[in-house]
Image (tube, grey):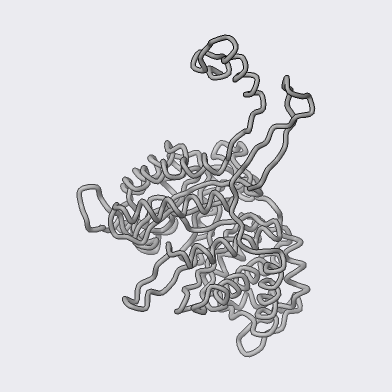
């Protein structure tokens, strides 16, 4: 428990203080965080990262980074410099240009998982391909859910030409919502067009950011041409970037939690460093979407205890450097809205709120980030509210001692006492 103290005025002593117990979750000691960080620095310095984009390679070469056998080596002093340059908080704005939330410290915001390729209707047990109309409906529901704080481009509309799908996902949200947006592009040109769309609505999207753009390295230790181009284009314009390594334990990352965590951290650090070399001070959110390969069936699972441990640990590494954080939780690997969906989503939401993860993607999702459900989204809104309330703890109000004495001595009831009524 973390306990903070705020002095109050009480009959039982002016110096008495208000105790505010707040439940928290911690996994790594300071020494363990520093060891893991050191291992990631060694990976970046000795093995390096493959980057499939000449423009980015030219930027890194001009900054003095070496390029050998198709891999860029990241010296530790450059990585440490980049961490110092990265802002410690990111402020998001609503569509009307007002500050909406600051991503830092103990802030926890939920948003639907992004880019689902299927949607599960309430009268069916089989997902279907989403349509643009589904995205309109989904975004409208998100707008009115109290505990789903951010929008996301949650569905891929299949009734739109494939080359336009990343752009068109942004349109319904810009049209009907005021909440900030977690989004991303599927193509190099897509991110440019999406930034133009944002500019039409809010002006310069880097000055009062309405949207955060996801970029995902390709494990192990590689950036594809599309994702690194998106990162560079966003960094140049000061657009908030959410870096989301996706280690698959046993497939594209070591099968052990520690090994996957080191790889995850190295990939995130490479993205942070590139962004700061492009534009020092670029706003970054350190995120992730770890999963594990089920060797029996060849399927990927995202809500196992092992993946929750990886996520909790990398968030602590990010917080070690006071960086804004992100993860995928409050979703489920199941194919239906059933007991498993409730358990996995509830555990994830509680872990996220106790660990104070700033951006939590996942509500509404099943089938390991592949399918969205409006019904589950509404249920998850309640789950998120429950977890948020629990994580706030309670006020151990010493003034209540005065109330107990008054009720007992006066023969009153707590129900009618002004302390209860307020």
- Position of the C terminus, as image quadrant, is top right
- Across and down, in percent, residue 90 comes to 65, 50
Q: Nearer the viewer, residue 197 or 126?
A: 126
Residue 222 lies left or right of residue 153; in this view the side is right
x and y percentages locating residue 219 in the rendered image: 52, 76
Residue furthest out toward the bottom: 69
Residue at figure coordinates x 50%, y 72% from the top left = 247
Q: Tell me residue 341's x, y (percent).
A: 34, 54
Which quadrant holds residue 280? Answer: bottom right
Q: Within the image, what quadrant is residue 202 found in?
A: top right
Say which of 219 and 347 sits in front.
347
Is 422 drawn above or below residue 218 in the view shown? above
Q: Quadrant of residue 100?
A: top right
At 31% from the left and 58% from the top, the residue drawn is 118
Task: From this view, report whether residue 307 is shown above or below residue 10.
Answer: below
**Point 38% across, 55% down: residue:** 365
Say how many tags the image has.
0
Q: Above or below — where is 406 with respect to 139?
A: above
Measuring from the top left, give residue 164's x and y in whole percent.
Answer: 40, 59
């Amino acid at each position: 428990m973390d306990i903070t103290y705020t002095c109050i005025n009480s009959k039982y002593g002016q110096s008495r203080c208000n105790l505010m117990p707040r439940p928290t979750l911690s996994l790594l000691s300071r020494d363990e965080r520093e060891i893991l960080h050191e291992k990631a620095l060694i990976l970046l310095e000795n093995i390096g990262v493959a980057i499939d984009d000449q423009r980015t390679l030219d930027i890194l070469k001009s900054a003095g980074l070496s390029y050998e056998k198709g891999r860029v080596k990241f010296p530790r002093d450059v990585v440490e410099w980049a961490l110092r340059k990265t802002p410690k908080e990111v402020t998001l704005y609503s569509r009307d240009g007002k500050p909406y939330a600051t991503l830092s410290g103990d802030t926890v915001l939920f948003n639907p998982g992004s880019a689902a390729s299927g949607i599960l209707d309430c009268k069916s047990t089989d997902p279907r391909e989403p349509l643009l109309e589904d995205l309109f409906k989904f975004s409208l529901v998100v707008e009115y859910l109290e505990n789903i704080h951010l929008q996301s481009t949650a569905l891929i509309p299949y009734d739109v030409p494939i080359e336009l799908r990343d752009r068109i996902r942004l349109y319904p949200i810009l049209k009907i919502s005021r909440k900030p947006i977690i989004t991303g592009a599927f193509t190099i040109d897509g991110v440019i067009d999406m930034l133009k769309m944002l500019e039409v609505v809010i002006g310069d999207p880097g000055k009062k950011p309405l949207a955060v753009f996801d970029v995902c390295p390709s494990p192990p230790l590689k950036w594809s041409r599309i994702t690194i181009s998106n990162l560079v284009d966003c960094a140049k314009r000061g657009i908030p970037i959410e870096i989301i390594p996706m280690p698959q334990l046993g497939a594209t990352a070591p099968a052990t939690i520690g090994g996957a965590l080191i790889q995850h951290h190295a990939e995130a650090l490479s993205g942070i460093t590139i962004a700061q070399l492009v534009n020092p001070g670029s706003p970054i959110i350190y995120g992730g979407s770890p999963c594990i390969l089920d060797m029996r069936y060849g399927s990927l699972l995202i809500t196992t205890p092992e993946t929750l441990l990886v996520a909790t640990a990398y968030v602590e590494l990010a917080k070690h450097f006071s960086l804004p954080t992100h993860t995928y939780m409050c979703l489920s690997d199941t194919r239906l809205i059933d007991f498993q969906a409730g358990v996995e989503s509830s555990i994830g939401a509680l872990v996220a709120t106790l660990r104070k993860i700033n951006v939590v993607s996942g509500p509404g999702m099943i089938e390991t980030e592949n399918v969205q459900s409006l019904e589950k989204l509404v249920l998850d809104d309640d789950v998120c509210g429950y977890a948020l309330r629990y994580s706030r703890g309670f006020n151990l109000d010493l003034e209540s001692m005065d109330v107990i004495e008054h009720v007992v001595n006066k023969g009153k009831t707590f129900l009618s006492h002004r302390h209860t009524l307020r």
